[in-house]
Amino acid sequence: MVAYVFGEFDRDRVLVGYVFLARHQALPKIKTASTNPYLVFRSLIAEAIAEREVPLQDLDLATSLVVGAINQVVDTTVLGHIKHDLAGHADRVADACVRMLGR
C-alpha cells in the first residue's frame, strides 16, 4: 500500500499533494469506509493483530502511527524538502511502519 500511495504521488504530484493537504476538510465528508485511507489501513492492522502477525495493541494508535508516517513523507515532499521520487523509498517506509507495529 505504501508503494501504491508513493507511486500515485510520483505520477501526479499536484493531484495527490492537493488530496493530502485538503484531507482534513474532505475526509469527514466521506461516508464509505472503503474510500477512507485511514479506515483501510485500520482494517488491515486489525486483521494483522487478529492473526497475531503483530502484537496486541491499541488499534487506533497503531493506525495513526502508520498513516502518520506515510502522510508525513508525502507532506514533506509537497513542501519541497524531499526532492526525488518517493516510489524508490516505499520499501524503507513500509519496513519502518511494520517496525512501529512491533514486528
Image (cartoon, helix red, strand yellow):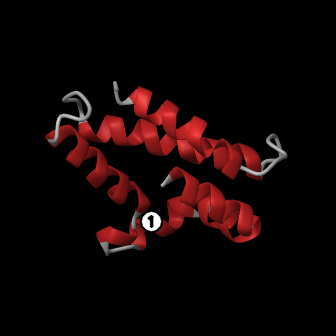
Residue closer to the observer: 45 or 28: 45
- The number of discs equals 1
Residue ID at (42%, 28%): 100
Q: How far across and down, in percent of the image, does residue 42 sit?
A: 31, 50
**In x, y percent, where is residue 81?**
81, 40
| Quarter of the image where the C terminus is located | top left
Residue drawn at x 57%, y 53% is 3
* Relative vertical location of residue 50 with respect to residue 32 in this rendering, above or below: above
Left or right for 71, reference 34: right
The image position of residue 50, as x and y in percent, is 15, 42
Label 1 sits on a secondary structure element that is: helix
Q: Which is more toward the observer, 23 or 37?
A: 37
Q: Is residue 97 above or below residue 18?
A: above
Left or right relative to 96: residue 28: left
Residue ID at (61%, 42%): 72
The percent coordinates of residue 23 (x first, y second) are 54, 61
The residue lying toward the viewer, choosing from 97 and 74, is 97
Horizontally, residue 16 falls left or right of residue 64, namely: right
The residue identified by callout 1 is 27
Which residue occupies 24% across, 42% down? 48
- Residue type highlighted by circle 1: Leu
Classify 10 Å Cα crowding around label 1: few (below 14), some (14-19), many (20 and above).
some
